[in-house]
Amino acid sequence: MNSGFGPGPRRLPPRGGRPAGLRCRSAARAAAAGLLATLLATGCATRKEVVQFQADHEEFRGRLDRIETELDRLNTRVDTLTALLGGNVGEHFANQEEFLRSMRADQRAVSAEIEQLVQTLAARVSDSDVHVRRLVAKLDEVNRLVTEIVANRDSLALSSSFDVGDPEKLYHQAYLDFSQGENELARLGFRQYLQLYPKTSLADNALYWIGETFLAEGEQDSALAAFEALEERFPASNKTPAALLKRGILLAARGETTAARELFNRVQRDYPESAEAAQARVRLEELGESGR
């Protein structure tokens, strides 16, 4: 029941470059600091005016931080939706790609307005509040539209991205998504495979990879639950040694060394010829050293 895919999948490298939000915030602070220094140096501002300017600047920074957070969250949600709606979309969903492109255009327009706002802050401090309110209103509207799609994403994704009539194709597509770092999309595919084909030779593999998607996202409790379910549902699975090893590693990281040792010993005892047995031996040695 081995998937035949060899070692674990390669992860895509993170995108480089400095986030636009950080550039905006740094530029805003520099512009405001420069304006304040000019006012003080020329004696054009009273103490009361300086205090008021500082208060206004702090409020502006807070609002700019909110915009930065909203833009980052919007980017993530749009990327996820693009993946979920990708693939062979049926005629009924043909307009979804155009809608996503429109949302991305709105997001780019919002980013451009923030850059322009920062560049003109020193000359137009009094106008900044109007710009910020307009940007926040636009973000709220875009997020509302995104939320409507997210509410229906499961049905859209399953109807468009997966060929559920072909078990091999469904499984391999889910694995490919996982190998490309699309954990949520891969998990959706593996779960669909388990629901439609629970007795095939790849069903146990699908459940194992569901655990790996959770592990890749740092969801340790969910990963443990999936690996435990694998042993319960498929006790003869060839993925059991790997699942036992992963459970032991997770428990050891939590400080539950007794339970971790038991799992590592099981791997060595029950699967002595497996690659996981050698890894379990190393883990046991590490626990022994830490216990002395």
Image: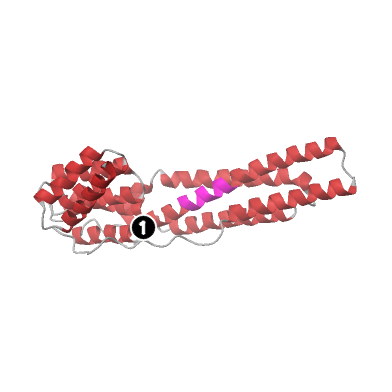
Q: Position of residue 47 (x, y in %)?
A: 85, 37
Q: What residue do we see at 39% from left, 57% from top?
A: 83
Tell me how many marks there are. 1
Which residue corresponds to mark 1? 181
Foreground residue, 122 or 283? 283
Q: What residue do we see at 59% from left, 43% from top?
A: 66
- The reply, left or right, for residue 127 in relation to residue 181 is right
Q: Quadrant of residue 86?
A: bottom left
Q: What residue do we see at 22% from left, 42% from top?
A: 260
Asked if residue 207 shows in the view, the reply is no
User: Which element carries disc 1, helix, strand or loop?
Assistant: loop
Foreground residue, 273 or 110? 273
Foreground residue, 165 or 259? 259
Q: Position of residue 172 (x, y in %)?
A: 24, 61
Q: Position of residue 214 (x, y in %)?
A: 32, 47
- Is 15 inside the magenta-drawn segment? no
Q: Position of residue 8 (x, y in %)?
A: 27, 60
As drawn, the residue found furthest toward the top would be 48
Figure colour scheme: secondary structure
Residues in magenta?
Answer: 68-77
- Decide: is 9 above or below 140: below
Q: What residue do we see at 40% from left, 43% from top?
A: 151
Determine crowd level at label 1: few under 14, some 14-19, many 20+ residues with C-alpha closer than 10 A.
Answer: some
Task: Give the residue type that dot 1 points to.
Answer: Gly
- Decide: is 173 above or below 254: below
